[in-house]
């Protein structure tokens, strides 16, 4: 389906034409009509499926059609990290090229005083679109720098990552300040129980659109070491003795492990850096800048960089700890083999991780290649003897529903409600 088959307005379509965007991705095809029609939407799809455009395009189109107050913050987009907020802001610049009256401001921590003063000026004057991290937005709200009582659109992007980072209470606090008429859109890469609970709390009779998680790209060579926890450091040392390894991300489940592994690699004279929640925003920005610029070869990180960060030339991903569900595994190793490149993904599977790794193989519908432990590291636990009695990788079926302009859209909804907007997007 093409963008022109929707009723996005002409200014948006002109910008998409200039950007050579013609065909919609599945998440865009199923969400854009629903948002244009005024429904709350819960979208579940992995990174790289076009989620940002799926909510930005219809909201920008509605705002440009008019009928919204000039002195109000008409749309708030929440992002878990500064990096993702910046990416959304960049996408906004392209999509809104022909929308002179629809501008945005990105609001996030880690800035100097002059930046904060700039944010205050924009917020108090009313900004059509505000893209913000929860903590920074709350800081402005507490001192009265902005008013959300007339906000028409509220978007939660990467909602599962926000919950992982402890923003649940912040989100609920912000939600209380929104009017009951506010249209809400929530996107998540995974659908754990906490996300469903949050959706029930925030959204009003939402249309639910869930895309099946794609399996990893065929160009990713997936491998695994079956090992005991104490053998993992030895495996890391072995891998990096292979030679000139660059553009590598090592994912760990906890920040303390990130720090330990980073120190180990530094002792091996590996050009590396750590990325975790104990770093200040400025330190995180600096690390990410150096890694993207090639000044750092290896990034040791928690899942804070597993989603929402566009780095196209990663050669290898190492899962020091096994992710606890198949979707997280796909997100992690999906950092490599991008933009038609090839890549490697190596996972360390300790005996305690068998219960998480078996369902990943079940989801992939194949056995991941098992590598022999480096010489001198000892025996391995018996992976073949472990019996998994629960499959974590299966997706729940969703019943289809009839939708937009007499055509069928295959999302799932909790219940339906009348459209808030007519074709011109006015209340």
Image: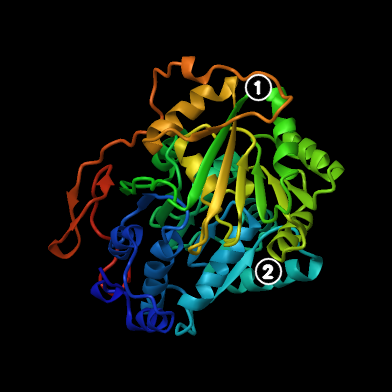
The quadrant holding residue 200 is top left
State left or right for residue 216 relative to residue 255. Answer: left
Would you place residue 363 above or below residue 212 in this image? above
Check disc 1 and report the residue beneath it. 228
Q: Nearer the viewer, residue 51 or 144?
A: 51
Indicate the secondary structure of the residue bearing disc 1.
loop
Q: Kindly tell me whether residue 417 is visible in this rendering.
A: yes
Whole-percent x, y for residue 299 in the image: 71, 50
Q: Nearer the viewer, residue 268 or 304?
A: 268
State left or right for residue 19 relative to residue 377. Answer: left
Name the residue: 56% across, 69% down: 89
State left or right for residue 6 relative to residue 12. Answer: left
Which of the numbered marks, if any, corresponds to residue 119? 2
Q: Nearer the viewer, residue 127 or 106?
A: 106
Whole-percent x, y for residue 363 in the image: 39, 35
Name the residue: 48% across, 82% down: 97
The quadrant holding residue 147 is bottom right
Q: Nearer the viewer, residue 173 or 340?
A: 340
The quadrant holding residue 112 is bottom right
View extreme (front): residue: 375
Name the residue: 54% across, 38% down: 223
State left or right for residue 427 relative to residue 294. Answer: left
Badge count? 2
Which quadrant is the N terminus positioned in? bottom left
Name the residue: 83% across, 40% down: 263
Characterize the local packing of mark 1: few (<14), some (14-19) or many (20 or more) Cα atoms within 10 angstroms: some
Distance from label 1 to label 2 (Cα)? 50 Å
Whole-percent x, y for residue 251 in the image: 64, 42
| Marks 1 and 2, the one that precedes in the sequence | 2
């Amino acid at each position: 389906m093409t963008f022109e088959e929707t009723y996005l307005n002409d200014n948006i379509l002109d910008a998409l034409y200039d950007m050579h965007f013609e065909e919609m991705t599945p998440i865009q095809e199923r969400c854009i009509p629903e948002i244009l029609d005024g429904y709350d939407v819960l979208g579940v799809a992995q990174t790289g499926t076009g989620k940002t455009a799926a909510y930005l395009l219809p909201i920008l189109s509605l705002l440009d059609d008019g009928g919204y107050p000039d002195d109000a913050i008409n749309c708030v987009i929440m992002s878990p990290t500064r990096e993702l907020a910046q990416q959304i802001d960049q996408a906004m610049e392209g999509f809104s090229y022909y929308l002179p009256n629809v501008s945005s401001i990105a609001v996030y921590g880690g800035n100097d005083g002059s930046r904060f003063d700039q944010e205050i000026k924009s917020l108090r004057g009313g900004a059509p679109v505000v893209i913000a991290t929860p903590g920074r937005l709350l800081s402005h709200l507490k001192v009265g720098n902005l008013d959300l009582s007339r906000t028409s659109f509220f978007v939660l992007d990467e909602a599962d990552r926000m919950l992982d980072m402890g923003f649940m209470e912040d989100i609920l606090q912000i939600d209380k300040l929104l009017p009951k008429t506010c249209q809400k859109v929530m996107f998540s890469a995974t659908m754990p129980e906490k996300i469903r609970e949050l959706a029930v709390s925030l959204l009003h009779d939402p249309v639910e659109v869930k895309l099946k998680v794609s399996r990893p790209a065929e160009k990713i060579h997936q491998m695994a070491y079956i090992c005991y926890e104490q053998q993992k450091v030895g495996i890391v040392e072995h891998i990096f003795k292979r030679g000139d390894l660059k553009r590598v991300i090592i994912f760990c489940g906890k920040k303390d492990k990130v720090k330990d592994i980073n120190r180990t690699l530094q002792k091996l004279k590996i050009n590396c850096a750590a990325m975790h929640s104990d770093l200040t925003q400025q330190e995180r920005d600096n690390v990410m800048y150096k890694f993207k610029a090639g000044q750092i070869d290896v990034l040791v990180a928690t899942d804070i960089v597993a989603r929402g960060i566009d780095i196209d030339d990663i050669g290898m991903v190492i899962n020091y700890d096994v992710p606890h569900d198949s979707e997280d595994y796909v997100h992690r190793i999906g950092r490599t083999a991008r933009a038609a490149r090839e890549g490697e993904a190596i996972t360390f599977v300790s005996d305690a991780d068998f219960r998480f790794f078996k369902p990943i193989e079940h989801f992939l519908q194949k056995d991941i290649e098992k590598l022999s432990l480096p010489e001198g590291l000892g025996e391995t636990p018996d992976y073949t003897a472990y019996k998994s009695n629960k499959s974590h990788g299966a997706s729940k079926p969703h019943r289809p529903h009839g939708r937009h302009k007499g055509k069928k859209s295959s999302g799932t909804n909790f219940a339906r409600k009348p459209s808030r907007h007519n074709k011109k997007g006015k209340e």
